[in-house]
Amino acid sequence: MGRRVVIETDTLAARLAERAKELRGQADELAPGGAKDTLLELAQFAETSAHMSRYSASSRIEAVVGQDMNRFSRGERVQLKRPYAKAITRKNRTPDWLKRKGIVQGFKQDFIYIRWDGRRTIEQVPIRAVEKAGHSSGENRGPLHS
């Protein structure tokens, strides 16, 4: 059985903020005591985590993506850089990787999640192997460099 990839529709910060709101609502319904204090502590922890997640995610994505001076965002069209596409083409013997394009679905540290055109699955690809669609590295080379 293959490994499942789950792509969240909301950011971690948004999910944590929603959880904090739920916990505070539950705490409001309780009488003062240990259970209420525990829920309020958990809500505060979720709010703090949401704040930290927003900060670390934005700086991490900017730092990782900034290595290639590309700025990717969800929903953006991308393609593999020519050297990576050629390597996959040689390995899998599928010639369409040089022309294949996809849509960015999400990010995770050094990886980008892409749904390739004509496929249902989302694939994890090293971010250094991807460029915005239409910015083909080395596409204008002559026949000697192919």
Image: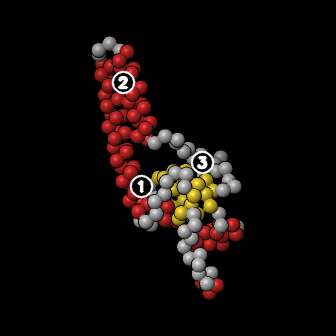
Where residue 35 appears, as percent x and y from the top left, is 34, 19
Label 3, secondary structure: give it.
Answer: loop
Amino acid tagged 3: Arg
| For residue 105, side relative to residue 93 (left or right) | left
Nearer-N-terminus badge (2/3): 3
Quarter of the rendering containing residue 36: top left
| For residue 113, side relative to residue 14 (left or right) | right
Amino acid tagged 1: Ile
Q: How far, Cα to Cα, is label 2 from label 3? A: 36 Å
Viewer-nearest residue: 49 or 74: 74
Crowding at mark 2 (Cα within 10 Å: few <14, some 14-19, many 20+): some
- Mark 3, residue position: 3
Q: How far, Cα to Cα, is label 1 from label 2? A: 31 Å
Viewer-nearest residue: 104 or 112: 104
Quarter of the rendering containing residue 102: bottom right
Where residue 125 appears, as percent x and y from the top left, is 54, 59
Residue furthest top in the image: 31
**80 w.r.t. 143: above or below:** above
**135 w.r.t. 144: above or below:** above
Label 2, secondary structure: give it.
Answer: helix
Nearer-N-terminus badge (1/3): 3
- Mark 2, residue position: 24
Q: Is residue 8 visible?
A: yes
- Mark 1, residue position: 61
Residue at the spot 65% in from the left edge and 63% down from the top edge: 100
